[in-house]
Image: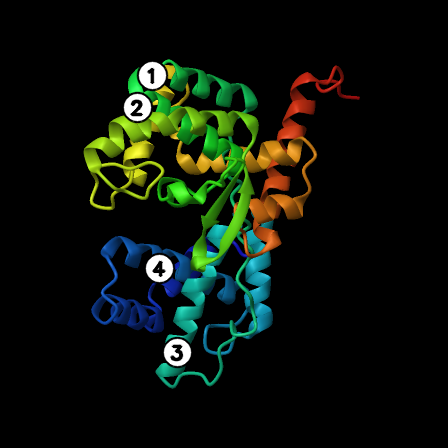
Amino acid sequence: MISPSSEKLIEFEVSADHHLEAFLEMMLTERGVSLNTLDAYRRDAMQYLLFLTRAGTDEIIADAQHVRRYLKELADSGLTARTQARKLSVIRQFQRFLILQGLRDDDPTSTIDMPRLGRALPKVLGFAEVELLLAAARETKGWRGVRLVALLETLYATGLRVSELVSLKLSSVSRDGRIITVRGKGGKERLVPLGDAAHAAIQTWLPFRETIVVARLKNVPWLFPSRAAAGHLTRDAFAKQLQELANTAGIQCDRLSPHILRHAFATHLLANGADLRSVQMMLGHADLSTTQIYTHVLTERLKSLVQDVHPLAGFRI
């Protein structure tokens, strides 16, 4: 057991480590890191050096096993994977600096993978919130309201990326109005079916498009044309309309964006029994693992539901 006085001495020795100071000087002068970043590097490196001193070694002779033990200590202390990854990154840069200086021949971090950060679960709207949003859109007056309903119904019915939605061409809609052809990432095309609500909303929009919008803009190929340079409604303009709609519907603005409606489409489909492969195809995901994130959203929502409403949720033995 190291006494408090010995601990202070070790900390003093570590803070005076000339290898560390040389490394920090290099980061400042050659890499141009900010002073705040430099302070963070110093703290992380000193913590590592303090661990090595306690283990009876130093940065010159430490091996991969020492680094693994240090990372385990960080994990055991409750630090997040993101924080562990940041600290490992500093150690890796420091050890590689020592190699460049000819102070050691190998990098003890070379065989160590970064801690897995996991993937943040996407935000989604509940069924009731989507209904509030659509109801608010239906209350919007004039042709802009009709267009807004068509945009929302199409987005919620198809899960299109917002860039795909606003750039749809009139020719993308099949003759019977039940299928749209979408050109997604990498120019890949996919067919996406339209439900009754989306189909009806687009059919209601088309006469307005012809008599009001196209009459002003002449021959335009877009389903949702505008005076913007691109010739169609822009992503930013649609996002702004959604924010205004969120205020009207009483939904927090930070919980609403076109992409969140795409998340809602996927999550609600899976919640109602759709298979993962079908949802993958409609979303245009190249990799099934990208679609699988929505199953994790459902799992978390179910956990929350059980915790909130199960009669024994608060019971403890």
Q: Please tell me which residue is depicted at 36% across the width and 22% down the height of the picture.
A: 146
* Nearer-N-terminus badge (3/4): 4
Q: Please tell me which residue is depicted at 44% across the width and 83% down the height of the picture.
A: 104
* Nearer-N-terminus badge (3/1): 3
Specify the quadrant of the image occupied by residue 242: top left
Nearest to the eye among marks 4 and 1: give it. Answer: 1
Residue under circle 3? 98
* Nearer-N-terminus badge (2/4): 4
* Nearer-N-terminus badge (4/1): 4
Closer to the camera, 56 or 260? 260
- Residue 23: percent from the left, percent from the top? 32, 71
Cα–Cα span, label 2 and label 3: 64 Å
Cα–Cα span, label 2 and label 4: 53 Å
Give, as a three-letter code, the residue at label 2.
Arg
Cα–Cα span, label 3 and label 4: 15 Å
Nearest to the eye among marks 2 and 3: give it. Answer: 2
Nearest to the eye among marks 2 and 4: give it. Answer: 2
Residue under circle 4? 41
Looking at the image, residue 262 lies above or below residue 204: below
Give, as a three-letter code, the residue at label 4.
Tyr
Cα–Cα span, label 3 and label 1: 65 Å
Marker count (numbered): 4
Q: Is residue 196 visible?
A: yes
Residue under circle 1? 140
Give, as a three-letter code, the residue at label 3.
Leu
Residue under circle 2? 144
The quadrant in which the N terminus is found is: bottom right
- Residue 169: percent from the left, percent from the top? 38, 44
Q: Please tell me which residue is depicted at 39% across the width and 78% down the height of the picture.
A: 98
Query: Is residue 252 shown left or right of residue 277?
Result: left
